[in-house]
Image: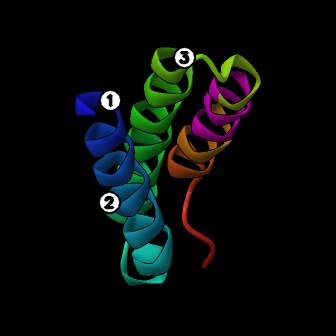
């Protein structure tokens, strides 16, 4: 039950940060953190393919965060 509650919280956080990405770069970074939290949930729940995909999304988000802002 605790893993399910953690999963709901992690996925909700990730989706909220994704929705807020246009408001600032900090939200892109937070989305990456949310992806890592969701990845942990995937591994804890036994859904390792989900965990792997979320790690990939986290790497993409952190790469986007590191890119300079367009002029």
Q: Is residue 68 above or below residue 4?
A: below
Q: Nearer the viewer, residue 27 or 70?
A: 27
> Residue 12: where, in percent of width, then height?
37, 62
Instruction: Check disc 1 and report its element: helix, strand or loop.
Output: helix
Q: Which mark is residue 33?
A: none
- The Cα atoms of the two marked residues, 2 and 3, are separated by 26 Å
Q: Nearer the viewer, residue 55 or 4?
A: 4
Sequence-wise, the earlier of marks 2 and 3 is 2
Is 54 in the magenta? yes
Instruction: Check disc 2 and report its element: helix, strand or loop.
Output: helix
- The Cα atoms of the two marked residues, 3 and 1, are separated by 10 Å
- The Cα atoms of the two marked residues, 1 and 2, are separated by 27 Å
Residue 25 visible to an observer of this rendering: no
Sequence-wise, the earlier of marks 3 and 1 is 1
Sequence-wise, the earlier of marks 1 and 2 is 1
Look at 38% across and 39% down and name the residue there: 33
Magenta stretch: dominant secondary structure? helix
> Residue 59: where, in percent of width, then height?
63, 32
Horizontal relation, residue 32 to residue 1: left or right: right
Look at 32% across and 60% down and name the residue there: 26
Mark in the foreground, 3 or 1 = 1
Magenta segment range?
51-58
Is 16 in the magenta? no
Residue behind mark 1: 3
Residue behind mark 3: 43
> Residue 19: where, in percent of width, then height?
47, 79
Q: Is residue 65 above or below residue 53?
A: below
Residue behind mark 2: 26
Instruction: Check disc 3 and report its element: helix, strand or loop.
Output: helix
Q: Is residue 51 above or below residue 10?
A: above
> In which quadrant will I find the N terminus?
top left
Residue 56 visible to an observer of this rendering: yes
């Amino acid at each position: 039950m605790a893993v399910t509650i953690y999963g709901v919280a992690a996925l909700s956080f990730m989706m909220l940060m994704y929705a807020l990405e246009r408001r600032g770069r900090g939200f892109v970074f937070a989305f990456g953190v949310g992806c890592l939290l969701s990845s942990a949930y995937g591994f804890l729940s036994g859904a390792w393919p989900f965990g792997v995909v979320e790690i990939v999304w986290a790497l993409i988000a952190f790469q986007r965060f590191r890119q300079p802002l367009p002029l």
